């Protein structure tokens, strides 16, 4: 038997200390929360995806009375990006969320398991690691590469 362990590393810093390029992507994710349709959870999420070539594609969560039909901001943006810019590598994604009337979350918002799996497959198609920026009022977490978010992800298909 062998014991193995995985560690992840990421950075945390205030939004104002991000490089201008990443500040801009975070700003796009925050703006994208305005497009959310979240009458059931009142949790308004925005995602901004930076593509090779410089285009930024945004998405937001879209809910439905048949709860299972709803989808997350990250997948809205990633699927739109692939549908409209096939073959274009995804370089980064920023995620932000507002909670009801409280405004943007204090803590960084982190993608759900299904979105992590979609990010992993997107990264496999892309040329290099995807930079993930998770926005919170307290700080922005910056993760280089999706494996850190989904260790031992499903890759064997
Ligand atoms: N949601 C996202 O859009 N992204 C996440 O990373 C977490 C959750 C959405 C799904 C649902 O519409 C609402 O937030 C509450 O879970």
Image (cartoon, helix red, strand yellow):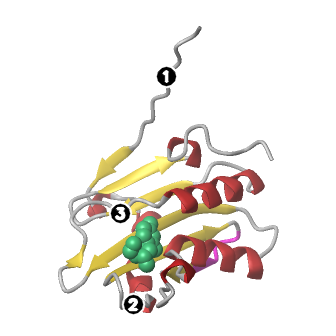
Q: Secondary structure at mark 2?
A: helix
Neighbours of disc 2 within 10 Å: few (<14), some (14-19), many (20+): some
Whether residues under marks 3 and 1 lie with C-beta atoms below 8 angstroms apart, the answer is no
Q: Mark 3 to mark 2: distance in Å?
A: 16 Å
- Which of the marked residues, 3 or 2, is nearer the chain's N terminus? 2
Whether residue 29 is visible, yes or no, is no
Q: Is residue 124 above or below residue 108?
A: above
Placement of the N terminus among the 4 image quadrants: top right
Q: Who is closer to the viewer here, 14 or 42?
A: 42
Instruction: Give the left or right position of residue 124, taking residue 105 as reference.
Output: right
- Which of the two marks, 2 or 1, is nearer to us in this view? 1
Q: Which residue is mark 1?
A: 5
Range shown magenta: 53-57
Task: Please give the label number shown on residue 109.
Answer: 3
Label 3, ligand 1: CB separation under 8 Å: yes
Whereabouts is ligand 1, in terms of quadrant?
Answer: bottom left
Give the residue drawn at x 45%, y 29%. 7
Q: Compared with residue 121, is residue 145 higher up or lower down, i.e. above or below?
A: above
14 and 34: which is toward the camera: 34
Query: On residue 34, which mark appears?
Result: 2
């Amino acid at each position: 038997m062998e014991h193995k362990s995985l560690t992840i590393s990421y950075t945390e810093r205030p939004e104002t200390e991000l490089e201008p390029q990443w500040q801009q992507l975070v700003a796009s994710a925050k703006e994208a929360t305005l497009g959310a349709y979240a009458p059931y959870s009142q949790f308004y999420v925005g995602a901004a995806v930076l593509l090779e070539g410089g285009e930024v594609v945004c998405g937001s969560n879209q809910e439905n009375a048949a709860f299972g039909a709803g989808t997350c901001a990250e997948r809205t943006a990633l699927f739109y990006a692939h549908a409209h810019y096939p073959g274009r590598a995804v370089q980064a994604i920023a995620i932000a969320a507002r909670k009801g009337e409280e405004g943007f979350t204090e803590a960084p918002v982190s993608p759900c398991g299904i979105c992590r799996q979609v990010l992993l497959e997107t990264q496999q198609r892309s040329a290099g690691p995807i930079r993930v920026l998770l926005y919170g009022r307290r700080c922005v977490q910056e993760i280089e590469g999706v494996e850190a978010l989904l260790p031992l992800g499903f890759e064997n298909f």
